[in-house]
Image (tube, grey):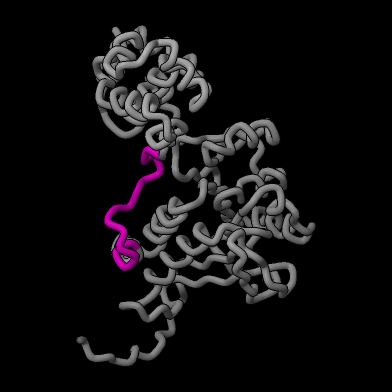
Amino acid sequence: MEAYSPPSPMPNLEPDIKVGFILSPRFTLLAFASFIDCLRHAADESDRSRQIHCHWKIIAPELAPVEASCGVELMPQVVFPDPSEFDYVVMVGGLLPWCLDQPEETYDYLHAARRKNISIAGLCTGSFILANAGLLDDHDCAVHFEHRQQFAAMFPKVRPVTDQIYVNDRGIITCPGGTTALDLAASLVKDHCGQARAVKGLVSLLVDKHRATHHMPRGPYDHLAVCGDWRVEQSVELMERNFTRPFKIQELARRLGSSLRELNRAFARQAHDSPTVVWRKMRLSHAHWLLLNTSRTATQIAYECGFTDAAHFARWFRRTYGQPPNAFRVQRRKV
């Protein structure tokens, strides 16, 4: 076993990145812990955890414990300081609707940060809080696919995005939470502290790869692979294996030893869509990811995803995403 050696004296350095965290009522612990532990490991040598290269504080309108969604309580460290002390103010969301129960001081603080050109971020449903403050109007916003419909209904002036694991739109950053907060933290560490620090933050947490913003998140049909209905589970497996050469649903039912009527009923129960619609949406989702993450042409992607030709693909892509494939690729890469 390696002998313990005390850390060297704390160097007198200005941190490269400074972050203030605001915890909402019933905040999600994983999103917060993923982000802050990436900072912690990137901040110092080995596992010393001194705030050398990265600095953070939990801030609040008052020094009262905040309960996480799992029941654990955390105590803020300081009443709201001048926002200019930080490079980022991070709003950690939690369970709806409780996380929206914010005092006016919190909304005022977020607005003050933006007036001073301080970047703000919303983790998990922190995006709901930022939108509720009016800070996300006419912005793209990364939300969890399960919350997309609710978010769009509540905030029609905001553009919800479910195909990216984080979005930075003009200094307002959002991510859907969970472990995507770790990838966002690593990206910010890389920007401020360099690649080596970002890699250290990930390696120390046994993360083998940093996911970029356009990494394909899990889709709305992923749960069907373990939904408990064998017809649907086996159908999804066959669909994923046959993106390039999809066959008729009658053939899918035959391969499963099921009737077409039984298969349609099973999908209606589990997916609230027909097998045809589910398969097409899965192929379009894969095509969407290929557009953003590869240099393949729209024609190549069309054939790879089982569309008869580029025009057929473009027609369905536009119906689903509002733009033809090439225009969509150009616009999203600019963002």
Q: Is residue 154 left or right of residue 15?
A: right
- Magenta residue span: 202-217
The residue sitting at the right extreme is: 104
The residue sitting at the left extreme is: 1
Q: Residue at x 49, y 36 (%)?
A: 162
Residue 209 in magenta stretch: yes
Q: Residue at x 52, y 35 (%)?
A: 161
Residue 309 in the image: above or below residue 211: above
Q: Residue at x 41, y 14 (%)?
A: 276
Q: Quadrant of residue 304?
A: top left
Q: Quadrant of residue 82?
A: bottom right
How many numbered marks are there?
0
Q: Nearer the viewer, residue 151 or 53?
A: 151
Which quadrant of the rendered structure holds the N terminus?
bottom left
Q: Nearer the viewer, residue 15 or 43?
A: 43
Q: Residue at x 29, y 12 (%)?
A: 254
Q: Quadrant of residue 233?
A: top left
Residue 44 visible in this rendered orientation of the protein:
yes
The image shows residue 318 at horizontal and vertical percentages of 46, 15
Residue 47 in the image: above or below residue 295: below
Residue 334 visible in this rendered orientation of the protein:
no
Residue 291 in magenta stretch: no
The image shows residue 320 at horizontal and vertical percentages of 48, 19
The image shows residue 186 at horizontal and vertical percentages of 39, 58
The image shows residue 12 at horizontal and vertical percentages of 43, 84
Residue 261 in the image: above or below residue 327: above
Q: Nearer the viewer, residue 334 or 234?
A: 234
How would you classify the magenta stretch by its main secondary structure? loop
